[in-house]
Structures are given as C-alpha cells and as structure tokens.
Amino acid sequence: MLTTNFVPGTPNWLDLGAPDTDAAARFYMTVLSWSYEPLPEAGGYGFFRLDGSTVAALGPLTEEGATAGWTLYFATEDADATADAVRAAGGSVRVEPDDVFTAGRLAAFTDPQGAEFAVWQPRDIGGLEKVMDRGSMCWTELYTTDAGAAKSFYSAVFSWSYDDQEMGGGMTYTLASSPGGGAEGDAAQGGMMTLPKENLDAGSRPEWHPYFCVDDCDATYAAATGNGGSTLVPPVDVPGVGRLAMVRDPAGAVFGIIMGDPNYQL
C-alpha cells in the first residue's frame, strides 16, 4: 500500500502535464473535489489540494513533443546516482538531475520499453501529504510491452521485489514492492502488466498511471465522462480489489479510480 513514509523506491510525488492548465484544474476540481493553488514563482506550476493536504501537482508541458499525462515520481536519496543506474540498466535520461529551488532535486527518465517516470530527492518538500484516502492516490500501475524486462529494469534501479498474480486467460499481473516499503503482506505499492496485442492495436502505449480512491466509482466516472473525459475501462467489479474504472481526461491524460472492497486493502 502507499504511504507517506517515503523510503527509496516508493512513490512520493505525482504531477500532471497539461496543454491548458486552467482547463485541467477545472476538470479535476469538479471530478475529485480538489482545490488548486498556483505558484506564481514556479512558471505555471501549482498544487492540487484536498482538505488542505497536497495530493498532486499540475504544470504546463515543457518538453518538446510532450503530450498530456501524469508523471509518477519515486523517492530517491540521490537523484544523480539514480540517473546513473537508469543509464546502466538501459533506460534514458530525459531531464538531467536538477534542483527545484530549495524544495528538492528531480530527474526524469524513460524506461527501455518507453514508459516515462521521474524521481524526487526531497529537501524542503518531502512529497505528497495525503495518500490512500478519498480523492488521493492509492495505487500506481505500469502498462508495458514486456513485463519481464520491466521487472529487471526497475529491480536494477530501485531494488524492487515482485509477486506475480495469475489473472486467467494467460494474463499475469505483477505486484511491485520497495525494500522497507511496508509490513509483510501490504508492501505492494503498484502493479505492472504486459499490454495485450488488442490494446496495442487500439493505441495503448507503455506508461505509468495513478489510481485515485473514491467513495462512489460510478458517480466519479459519470462526472469524469460528463465533463469531457473519455472511457478506457467502464466501471467494473474486480474480486478482492473493489470497483474500478479508467478514463482519459479531456486532454488525454490517463488515470484510474477505485472504490475499494472493504475486506481488501490495496
């Protein structure tokens, strides 16, 4: 499960790159009841908050050719060393390690299959202030073209361990955990799966995306699709997990929503 005890390799930040930050802020404020606090000194970057706690961030697209999307950040004690590890494992460095004022140090990468992610080395800002509660991130997920290769890469970079779960029909879902990321049995912080051919043919690509906790999956899905979002996975019950859906926001960024099974904790 996600926590705000950000040991190395665990998710500790999340931001959305959008072509129109005002429109993106309005969408998520409507769908997830967030508020938005722009930071005038940060070039259009700002914080999404819920009940006074930071749950995500938002900024304009800054990389050439970038499209709307959520970026997951993983905790590191040394962004420069992580960049070296990414290169050694076959990934690429899109944004070299750099200081963000006194808040921390970041770097952004692409894994060998093409999924983008980043790391955050905390200083003044330790990371997200709320996870696993209504309206906040409660799961992370990697879609990839080769789960076996992805497992090797992230193990080399973050020392993750894995637990493969058979889904039926020849599909495998892999749970990922960081050393020290939680008590035995609840350490998993995210999952990964190889995209089936039909998903690839339909335009899916390797990517990390977040899931947010909600009280009513169907109502939140209706709010998202009623305000310009589009359907990837309509609300569906997943035994032992809960009721979930996946959508694209109006600019194309992918996210999921989960109404958890009260007898199961992600």
Image (cartoon, rainbow, N blue to C red):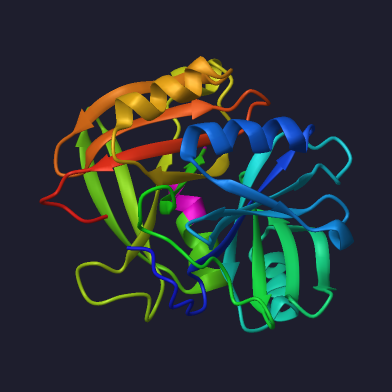
**Which sits in the foreground, 49 or 88?**
49
Residue 67 showing in the rendered view: no
Which percent across, then down, holds residue 100? 81, 71
Nearest the eye: 54 or 164: 54
Magenta span has 149?
yes
Write down the quadrant of residue 177 in the picture: bottom left
Magenta stretch, residue numbers: 145-150
Name the spot of residue 28 as percent of width and height, x first.
57, 37
In the shown orientation, is residue 87 left or right of residue 151? right
Residue 85 shown left or right of residue 235 in the figure: right
Residue 231 vs residue 79, the one in the foreground: 231
Indicate the quadrant where residue 93 lies.
bottom right
Screen quadrant of the N terminus = bottom left
Kindly report the secondary structure that dominates the magenta region of the rendered protein: helix
Q: Tell me the residue at 45%/17% (across/down).
A: 198
265 lies left or right of 232: left
The answer to if 65 sits in the magenta stretch is: no
* Rendered view: 199 above or below 134: above
Q: Residue at x 52, y 72 (%)?
A: 158
Q: Quadrant of residue 23?
A: top right
Judge whether 170 appears above or below 139 on screen.
Answer: above
Residue at 27 percent of width and 53 percent of height: 164
Residue 145 location (% of width, % of height): 52, 37
